[in-house]
Amino acid sequence: MEGAASRDVIERVRLAVLKGSKRSLANTATNIIKGYDFNNGVNWLEIITSFASTGFQASNLGDAIDIVNNMLEWRLSHEQVTRDCSEEEQNPMYRESVKCKIFLGFTSNIISSGVGDIIRYLVQHHMVEVIVTKTGGIEEDLIKCLADTYRGEFSLSGADLRSDGLNRIGNLLVPNDNYCKFEDWIMPKFDQMLEEQKTNNVLWTPSKVIARLGKEINDESSYLYWAYKNDISVFCPGLTDGPLGDMLYMHSFGNGGGLVVDVVPDIRAINGEAVQASPRKTGMIILGGGLPKHHICNANLMRNGADYAVFINTAQEFDGSDSGACPDEAVSWGKIRNSAKSVKVHCDATIAFPFLVAATFASRREKSAAVAGARQLSQASIRRFILEPSEERTRELEEDYRQEVGETENVYLREDGK
C-alpha cells in the first residue's frame, strides 16, 4: 500500500509541477528572449537593438526605440487616400512630404543634467516641432550659458551646502553665484521688454518671453537659442515657478507692476498645434512627468489623441499621480488613441534617452548625411570624368573622334563617287 500511495502522491505532484502548456509560443519568434553576444565584438547599435529581446525595462526601451522610429518613418503616403481629401492631399509628392508632428516634453532636471545637450541637438537639427517644459527647463538652459553646473554627491549635507552657497539638484551642484549672474543678465532684457510693452503694446506670452530670451542669449550651446532660430515653439505654462519667476517678481517693483505675461494665447497656440496637425499624425516623447506630460497629453486630447507615445520616467501609478500614469490611463481620457503605439519606460531618463536618440534621430541623421555625401561624391566623380578625363579616357575620346571623322570622310568619298 505504501508503494501505491507514494506513486499516487508523486503522480499528483508531477501533474502540479509539470503542468503542460495549453498553447505554444514557438511561432512567435519576436518574443524569444536573447541577449547580445559580445563574442561578436562591441557594436553599440547592435547592443541597443538587442534591448528589445533582452526583457524587463530593456524591452520597454527597445519598444520605445521602435515607436520613435515609426514616428520618423511615417508619411501621409502610407495611408489610404480618402474621399474627403483635398486636391493637395491627393498629390503623391505632397503625401510623401507630410511627416509626423513630434511633441517633446521634459522636466527641468533634464536640462540641469547632461541630457540638456541631447535636447539641444534635437532642436538644433529641427527634429521636433513642439516643446513643453517647466520653468527650470528654461532658466537652467540660460544659466548654463553663463556659468557651469558641477557633479556632486546625493549624500552631501544640505546644511553644509547652504552655508557654502551651493545648491544641490540630485548629485549636481549649482553655485549660487550662477543665479546672481543670471539676474545681472536677465534684468536688462526685462527692462527692454517692458519698454516694448509700454510703447508698442506688445502682448507678452510665456512662449514669446522664452523665444526672446533664446534670441538674447545668442549661444549655440543653448537649446532655446536653436528653438528661436528654427522657429520651434517652447511652451511653459508655469513660467513663474522658479528663479525666472523670482526675477519677474523682483523686476515688478518700481516698474509699475512689471511685465504682463498672458497665458491664454499660449493655450490656444499649443492646442492649435494638435488640432491643426491633421492630416498629420502626432507623436509624444515625454521625459519625466508633471506639467510637461499633462500639457502635451491634454493638447492631443483636442484631436482625439496622439498616434504615438513614449513616456520615460520613474514615477509609479499607485498614488494616482499624472506623472506615474501609464499610457493606457491616457487612452481612457482620449489623450492617446486606441490604435496608438505607446510604451512607458520605467527608467531614469539620463540612462534611457541617450540610447533612444542614438538608435533613432542620430543614426538616421548620420545615414542621411552619409547618403548625401555619397551623392555629392558621385556627382563630383561624374563631373571630373566629363570635365577632367584621365589620360586613358582622353585616348578613348580621341580614338572615337578619329573613327567618327574617318567614317564621315568615307561617306563623303562615296557620295562623290571617288
Image (cartoon, grey):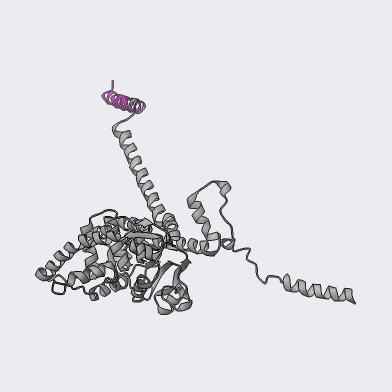
Rendered-image quadrant of the N terminus:
bottom right
Q: Nearer the viewer, residue 175 or 401?
A: 175
x then y, percent, for residue 114: 37, 57
Rendered-image quadrant of the C terminus:
top left
Magenta stretch: residue 71 in it?
no
Relative to 318, say whether 26 is above or below.
Answer: above
Name the image quarter holding residue 13.
bottom right
Give the dominant element type of the magenta stretch: helix, strand or loop. Answer: helix
x then y, percent, for residue 377: 35, 40
Q: Residue at x 30, y 60 (%)?
A: 141
Name the image quarter holding residue 168.
bottom left
Residue 189 visible in this rendered orientation of the protein: yes
Q: Nearer the viewer, residue 81 or 11?
A: 11
Q: Is residue 146 left or right of residue 79?
A: left
Q: Is residue 409 left or right of residue 364?
A: left
Name the image quarter holding residue 11.
bottom right
Q: Residue at x 36, y 48 (%)?
A: 369
Q: How many marks?
A: 0
Relative to 411, say whether 351 is above or below.
Answer: below
Relative to 138, say whether 359 is above or below.
Answer: above
Magenta stretch: residue 406 in it?
yes
x then y, percent, for residue 72: 39, 60
Q: Residue furthest right?
A: 1
Q: Is residue 201 left or right of residue 339?
A: left
Residue 96 visible in this rendered orientation of the protein: no
Q: Which residues are magenta?
A: 395-418
Relative to 46, say whether 112 is above or below.
Answer: below
x then y, percent, for residue 180: 24, 61
Q: Residue furthest top?
A: 418
Q: Residue at x 26, y 24 (%)?
A: 416
Q: Nearer the viewer, residue 355 or 66?
A: 355
